[in-house]
Amino acid sequence: QPSTITLRAAAPFPFGAALNPNLLKANTVYRQIAAREFSSVTAENHLKMHVVHPEQDRYNWSGGDTLVVFAERNGQRIHGHTLLWHQAVPKWVRAFQGDSTAWEQLIKTHIQTVVQHYKGRIAAWDVVNEAFDEDGTLRKSIWLEHLGPDYIARCFRYAREADPAVQLFYNDYNQESSPKKLAAILAMVADFKNRGVPIDGIGLQMHTNTNQSDDRIETAVRQTAATGLRVHISELDVRINPEKKPALVPTDALLDKQKQKFATIVRLYKTAVPKAQQHGITIWNIGDGDSWIPNFCQCPDYPLPFDKAYAKKPAYDGILDGL
Ligand code: XIL
């Protein structure tokens, strides 16, 4: 039996995947790869507010607990995703009637209940997800509407109160393609430091594609690292079909281009982020058949390092090359 290298053995920092607990239960191959290849685990959906907190007085820990127990058994670090996101709003919150004090209590209770439930087990949380627009202004969301423009800082303070040891992250997408969004996030970090608002890290989701400029990726990674905070490439996937062609097939040429992009991103992370700030790289699920991308872009795509039968793609070797 030849000994095979794994991502977790090869990486000098945590190398993770977002997982779906239903697939862990249903699919042996998925479960084996999840255990063997990764040293960090994120919940793709099951710690989001609409799943974990479906009614005001009821929490549903089943999916999150399944993932946490799985990760603990396999010696994996757990990265929590996410306490507050404008797309993960339960029905009861949409219908919620209350003044600003009542809304404040609502998010404080949510954040502190979830953080406390996993205290000592979840190492880090994406406290707030995707609060900025592409132009660098605050996204107009249910949270901004009811909580006002300083709500992000207060969410971080509530999380810190609930667990003084957990690492607190701000997570967003397109920092590598929207310079104004990147600048706004960096300005928020500077402001938090000035005011003593606790923050430990920044997540660059990095839902990217083979046409994305390496320079812009490098700028985003370097400027984020320059804050001195931990840097997480938090949701990596690389689309090979940025043009959304309906009949696209993954040719060798496209898969090689994808491999090079994975290698470049991983190599850049390894070399540009100081060791003490390397929170790690997380890919957004495992196999192409599990990816959220085809549904999201309404086009065929193959954005992950394993194919839908869980065979390693060239992109897998690209990651190894970058490590
Ligand atoms: C996505 C999941 O992958 C999908 O399964 C779900 O339907 C929607 O959310 N940015 C994020 C993630 O921060 O939480 C999103 O995950 C992808 C975009």
Image (cartoon, rainbow, N blue to C red):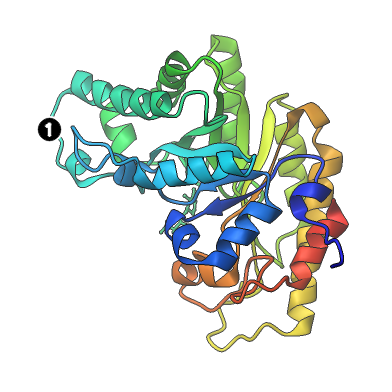
Which quadrant holds the N terminus?
A: bottom right
Indicate the position of residue 35 as horizontal and vertical percent values: 63, 53
Indicate the position of residue 157 as horizontal and vertical percent values: 45, 17
Dot 1 amino acid type: Gln
On screen, residue 309 versus residue 163, left or right, reads right
Which residue corresponds to mark 1? 97
Residue at the farthest bottom position: 247
On screen, residue 124 versus residue 109, left or right, reads right
Compare residues 247 and 179 and report the one nearer the observer. Answer: 247
Classed neighbour count for the residue bearing mark 1: other residues with Cα under 10 Å, few (<14), some (14–19), many (≥20) = few
Report which quarter residue 153 is drawn in: top left
**Which residue: 76% across, 43% down?**
219
Indicate the position of residue 127 as horizontal and vertical percent values: 47, 31
Question: On screen, 274 above or below 253?
Answer: above
Q: Is residue 277 visible?
A: yes
Report which quarter residue 244 is drawn in: bottom right
Question: On screen, 317 above or below 130?
Answer: below
**Which residue: 67% across, 50% down?**
38
